Amino acid sequence: MEKLKSAIIGCGNIYKVHADALQKNENAELKYVVDIREERAKTAAEKYNCSYIIEYEELLEKDIDVVHICTPHFLHSPMAVKFLEADINVFVEKPMALNYEEGIKIIEALRGSQAKLGVCFQNRFNNINQQTKKILESGRLGAIKGIKGFVTWNRDEEYYLKDDWKGFYETEGGGVLINQAIHTLDLMQWFGGPVEAVKGNVDTRVLKEVIEVEDTAEATLYFEDGAVGIFYATNTFSQNSPIEIVIDCEKGSLRLYDDQLIVTKNRESKALISSDNKGKYKSYWGNSHYKTIDNFYQDLIEGNYNNTVIAAEALKTLELIKNINQSASSQKKCYLNNELNFAK
């Protein structure tokens, strides 16, 4: 079978994960890497034995099947739209877009395109998260009554100063919500089902002289089925501690913490240890980039998209973030527009 020809745009921190995954993927062949910094692009091309390009628009003239977008947030939507309009498949790092409105532009581009788009919410494919989803769907613990998600990490001044696009709404789109805690918000709504409304607050409590985006956020999520979610995230803790998600159900509970899933039913608890191999990348990225990328390529070949986080799914999390921010500004509960029906 002929391999899908791929390119990666952006040779910063995350591109190596994508490049390594493509090298191991029997359905893919990495043909180009792209970066506006020629030396960085050249180094990446030498490392992965491919060609390099400085201006990403040149890819539109190449024989390419899939483009991976690993650039700063503000470039995600404009780049994705250009390639979708050219009927070239796109795999984009999170967040799908700078904000909800930019995400809508991707949806609109997909409607007129023959191409597909996948979003890198890789934590959905961690083993313990997959097991959690199966347990919830089996119904053996009954209906969900409540969910809590806690993210307590550290992002210091150096983190923001080394990249000129981080810390600003115009280029990053936000702070802890859209960059670090977006995976936890995605999992909460994926586990709990549609969110009807949110009420929340955001604040910048430590690096106000350095960044304009929030470093702390909290929200109450009101799910359509009546469950209530409690969400808290901050970049002001002294370390990157493990994320915790607890799901309280009618007949028991599930607790995800530090690569473990603890299932409690009838006052008895059982711990399931993640079988994901510890990777060579940053621990908080998770260990499922390879699975997520492999799934997308397999879905492109088979045409079913059952194992890809599609744009409509990713848009839900962008809408959650939008409404948390709106609620913080208005000090009112904000309702999500769940009547929108996006096919792609």
Image (cartoon, rainbow, N blue to C red):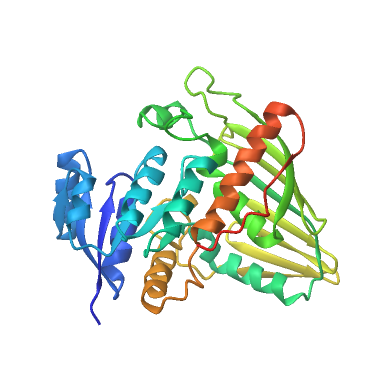
Residue 239: % across, % down: 54, 39
Q: In the drawing, does residue 120 fall left or right of residue 143?
A: left
Residue 66: % across, % down: 30, 62
The residue sitting at the top extreme is 209
Quadrant containing the N terminus is bottom left
Q: In the drawing, does residue 163 fall left or right of residue 132?
A: left
Check the image and report above or below for 201 versus 248.
above
The residue sitting at the front extreme is 112
Check the image and report above or below for 206 versus 121.
above
Q: Identify the residue shown where x is 43% and y is 60%.
A: 118
Q: Identify the residue shown where x is 60% and y is 41%.
A: 321
| 192 or 274, nearer to the observer | 192
Query: Is residue 134 visible in the rendered structure shown here?
Result: yes
Check the image and report above or below for 304 versus 63.
below
Residue 53: % across, % down: 16, 48
Query: Is residue 151 visible in the rendered structure shown here?
Result: no
Q: Identify the residue shown where x is 71% and y is 36%.
A: 200
| 249 or 195, nearer to the observer | 195
Q: How many labels does the image show?
A: 0
Q: Quadrant of residue 259?
A: bottom right
Q: In the drawing, does residue 205 fall left or right of residue 9?
A: right
Residue 113: % across, % down: 38, 60
Q: Identify the residue shown where x is 15% and y is 51%.
A: 52
Q: In the drawing, does residue 116 fall left or right of residue 175?
A: left
